[in-house]
Image: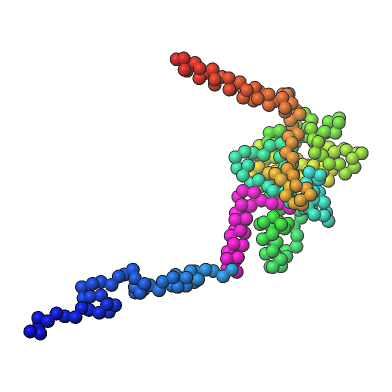
């Protein structure tokens, strides 16, 4: 008879029955510790502030070096040979210029461009004479400063203005003291004279610039050892285009001299065409006529 008596129901809260499965999403599921566990994991992943700061500084330096090596670089002007376009007199704060390193990957330097280039072997000017080798720490600091443009580079880099390109013949001077290219005088309003009352250039014999090379000169014409005197002058003073690093675009320091580096073509006055503003008239006229021409063509198309 005992087997026929009803069994007591299982007390509530004891646990699941023999055929029931525990709820894996419950608060007490194995392997879970609620919000506290997630917070502890996040706390472990977070880096200390000094580590994040080092990573940010390192990334910034790497990006700066990459940009200056392949896109644009800041150069220090150490001499006064480009006065007054670029300020670099001895004992003063020289200009820092931003040099475009991309343009000449697609085009060649043109007359009037202010370019930074590696001095050829024939160039032995005192403007960029080798300096005594610094110690390890000083050399490291100088190298890093050079990479980001705030120290003098320990290399033979020069900055000058392109006067003539390969195949042209340059000489000085005509009766008015002007440089001649292919027998025609240059228009050089950027020239700087140590003695404004005596604006006379040193004469030199005609030189035909080899193809693939440049004839360069400083704007401070009588205080610049350039293609006229480097390597003894002549073709030895020309600069191969392959040695050009880039084109000077902007003066970035000091703030008082912020501005664009002039790239006026001194040979422009030699052309027989109209002045610059008049040369733009055909383009303006073509643009103005384009609109009615398009409108007429649309009307004709609709009628057809």
* Predominant SS of the magenta segment: helix
Q: Which of 293 and 283 is in front in this view?
A: 293
Q: Nearer the viewer, residue 221 or 34?
A: 34
Which residue, as the protein is rendered here, is positioned at the far left? 1
Q: In which quarter of the image is residue 275?
A: top right
Number of numbered tags placed on the structure image? 0
Q: Which residue is drawn at 69% across and 48% down?
A: 98
Whether residue 243 is visible: no
Taking 68 as reference, is 133 above or below it?
A: below
Viewport quadrant of the C terminus: top left
Q: What stretch is highlighted in magenta?
A: 50-76
Q: In the image, residue 153 lies at what x, y percent?
A: 71, 56
In the image: residue 206, left or right of residue 70: right
Q: In the image, residue 217 lies at what x, y percent?
A: 77, 41
Q: Residue at x 66, y 51 (%)?
A: 73
Q: In the image, residue 199 lies at what x, y percent?
A: 88, 38
Q: Which residue is drawn at 58% across and 19% down?
A: 292
Q: Residue at x 27, y 77 (%)?
A: 12
């Amino acid at each position: 008879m005992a087997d026929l008596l009803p069994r007591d129901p299982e007390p509530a809260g004891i646990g699941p029955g023999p055929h029931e499965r525990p709820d894996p999403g419950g608060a007490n599921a194995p392997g879970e510790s609620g919000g506290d566990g997630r917070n502890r994991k996040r706390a472990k992943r977070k880096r200390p502030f000094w580590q994040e700061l080092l990573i940010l500084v390192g990334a910034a330096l790497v990006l700066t070096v990459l940009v200056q090596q392949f896109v644009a670089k800041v150069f220090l002007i150490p001499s006064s040979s480009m006065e007054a376009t670029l300020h670099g007199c001895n004992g003063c704060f020289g200009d820092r210029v931003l040099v475009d390193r991309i343009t000449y990957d697609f085009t060649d330097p043109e007359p009037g461009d202010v370019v930074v280039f590696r001095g050829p072997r024939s160039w032995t000017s005192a403007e960029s004479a080798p300096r005594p080798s610094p110690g390890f720490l000083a050399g490291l600091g100088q190298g890093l400063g050079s990479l980001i443009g705030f120290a003098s580079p320990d290399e033979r880099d020069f900055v000058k203005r392109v006067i003539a390109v390969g195949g042209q013949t340059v000489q000085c001077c005509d009766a008015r003291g002007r440089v001649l290219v292919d027998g025609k005088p240059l228009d050089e309003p950027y020239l700087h004279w140590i003695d404004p009352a005596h604006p006379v250039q040193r004469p030199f014999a005609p030189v035909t610039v080899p193809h693939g090379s440049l004839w360069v000169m400083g704007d401070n014409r009588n205080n610049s050892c350039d293609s006229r005197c480097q390597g003894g002058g002549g073709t030895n003073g020309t600069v191969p285009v392959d040695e050009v690093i880039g084109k000077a675009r902007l003066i970035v320091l000091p703030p008082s001299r912020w501005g664009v580096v002039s790239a006026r073509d001194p040979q422009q006055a030699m052309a027989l065409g109209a002045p610059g503003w008049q040369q733009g008239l055909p383009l303006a006229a073509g643009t103005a006529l384009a609109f009615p021409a398009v409108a007429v063509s649309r009307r004709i198309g609709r009628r057809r």
